[in-house]
Structures are given as structure tokens and as C-alpha cells.
Amino acid sequence: MTAKHADRTVTRRKALAIGGGVVAGVGVVTAVGVNAFGSDATGATATTVGSSSASSGQCVLMSSVTEGPYYLDGALVRKDITEGKDGVPLHLNITVQDTTDSCNPVKGAAVEIWHCDAWGYYSGYTTANPGGSAPAESEDGSTANDQTYLRGCQIANGNGVVKFETIMPGWYTPRTCHIHVKVHTGGEKEDGTYEGGKVNYTGQLFFDDETAKSVFALEPYSQHSGSYTALDDDMVYEGSGAAGGLLTLEPINKNKIEKGFTGTIVLGIDPDAENDGAGGAGGAGGGTPPSGAPTGTPPSGSPSDSPEPTASS
């Protein structure tokens, strides 16, 4: 993240990461109980959902994948990234550990996340068609590609912990429900963003199908219809549970999931390594983004049911 916030419209990175794949390493998730911020999603129906957990006592390097086509430089350092977006609340609690130094916390690491809204739209790329049938990104049908909703960065405390207040992501063709993440070290906060340093880890966080589908049955998610990609069928998730970025999720109220979830994960990184997610060996990260994604081609309005395994999402 080298660009200043004021220069975001100039420095946004709209190039697809072609041919990127999973690189070495496996990971660990540890459940940590926290309270999510509370707000109701309108029109929600009370539903009981169990928790998902993939805990492990090991401390090993997390798997890395390509950053995908929707990254923007200059994310704001902030805890609440919702910017008024409606959805089921998600309190995300991430711990960064140094796998090369007895799993000590990485104090001062900058954790950056970004994800789509309830209908599959990303801020900065609102002309990208999420697939299926979804309402327009805004009520008047306009687009606002200078928005920054559901993007942000936090600096890890002495325990290596960062916390975000966001919403459960929706989905877009041909991906499963996910959150993108980068871990930076060596930089510093400046003018509201994190400047300098290097990227040590680029990955994605995932949600179990039971939780995701229960959320998608609620408003406003239910207004997006179409074929949701199950976790095991996703082009990026490698099927390794915690090692592949699967979040531990706990509902705030098991009988009212509209109250929200806590999501926890431990990211094991090598602070001396550099991985910006721009590409790499292997072919596990392929897939074609929704029509209208930032490839220079206008949206077609009809997403493909058979993605090509050449571009990462």
C-alpha cells in the first residue's frame, strides 16, 4: 500500500493476477471468543446455526494465494469498514504470529482486508457483474468506483491481534464466500493509510457452507439469486480447513443469526518473506472473474458458467 488516500483514483491496481497459484505452507486457526458489534439485518428470519471450528495447536506458515482482481492501493487504517453497507454483522478477530520465532506475536504488523458486499459488488469495481440476478449496486442504478466500502487496514497490538467490524460477504460467480487479506510489515501509518514496508502474506479467508447459505437466505443477501459455489468446489480454497484459511465462526445468538458472527483465525507468517500475491508457481488459483471485472472489457451482463483456469479471483 504505497499510495496516499487522496491519490487512490490514480494508484488503484486494476490488473488481473494471471496464472497465480498456491505456494508452500500450511496454517493454523485458534478459536478466540469475542463479542461482535450488534445490529439487525432487516427482514431476517430467526434460524439456528452451529459453529464451525478448525482449531489446531500447531504453529506453521499459512498458505498464500494470489490477491485477485479487486485490490486497491491505499486502504484506510480503520476498524469499522462497513461504510453503511447492509448485511449480517461480522466481528473479525485476526492474530498474526511469527512462525520463525517460537510463534511470537508480530506486533505492528498491518493486516489489510477487502471483500464484496451482500450482492457481490466490490467498491472501486461496481461495474463488475456479480453473476446471477442481483439488484444494481446503488438504488438509482449509478456506479461509484471511488467508494471504499468493505476495505480497511488495522495495525496489530502487542499480542499480534487486529479486529475489524464488517458484514458477512456475499458471493459472485464463480467464487465461494471469501475475504481477501494481506499482511504487511516494516511500514508505518501515514495520512490515514499504511505506507512503506513489504507484503509478507497474501491470502483469502473462507466460510463454511452451512453458515454462508443460512446467511444468504436473509435480506439483503436473498435479493441476489443464482448459483452459489460451494466451498469444496471453489477454485482457490485448497480443502485444508484451517490451513487453507477457513475461519472459526460463532453466532452471537444461535437462534437469531441476523445478530451476527464472530470470526477468528491465526495467520502464521514469515516476517522476512515477501509475497505480494501477484503470481507464482502452480495452478490452484485460477478462474475467470465476473463479466465486467477490470480487464478493459465492458460488462457483458451474462457471467460464464464454465470459468477458464487462467486468471485468479
Image: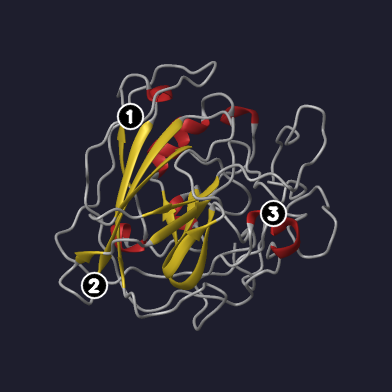
Q: Nearer the viewer, mark 3 or mark 2?
A: 3
Q: Residue at x 53, y 69 (%)?
A: 66
- C-alpha distance separating marks 1 and 3: 42 Å
Observer-nearest of 31 and 76: 76
**To which quarter of the image does residue 23 belong?**
bottom left
- Element type where label 3 sits in the image: helix
Looking at the rendered structure, which numbered label has been put on residue 99?
2
Mark 3 and mark 2 lie on one chain; the one further toward the N terminus is 3
- The percent coordinates of residue 12 (x first, y second) are 69, 62
Categorize mark 1 by other alpha carbons within 10 Å: few (<14), some (14-19), many (20+): some
Badge 1 amino acid: Val
Could one spot residue 230 in this view of the protein?
Answer: yes
Badge 3 amino acid: Ala
- Element type where label 1 sits in the image: loop
Question: On the picture, is 20 further left or further right than 8?
Answer: left
- The percent coordinates of residue 18 (x first, y second) are 64, 75
Marks 1,3: beta carbons within 8 A: no
Badge 2 amino acid: Thr
Q: Please, which residue is most extreme toward the front here?
A: 191
Q: Which residue bears the numbered disc 1?
A: 49
Please say if 255 is above or below 311.
above
Check the picture and name the quadrant holding the C terminus: bottom right
- Element type where label 2 sits in the image: loop
Q: Residue at x 57, y 75 (%)?
A: 278
Mark 2 and mark 1 lie on one chain; the one further toward the N terminus is 1
Observer-nearest of 193 and 57: 193
Q: Nearer the viewer, mark 2 or mark 1?
A: 2
Please say if 196 is above or below 251.
below
Looking at the rendered structure, which numbered label has been put on residue 6?
3
- The percent coordinates of residue 90 (x first, y second) are 42, 36
Check the picture and name the quadrant holding the N terminus: bottom right
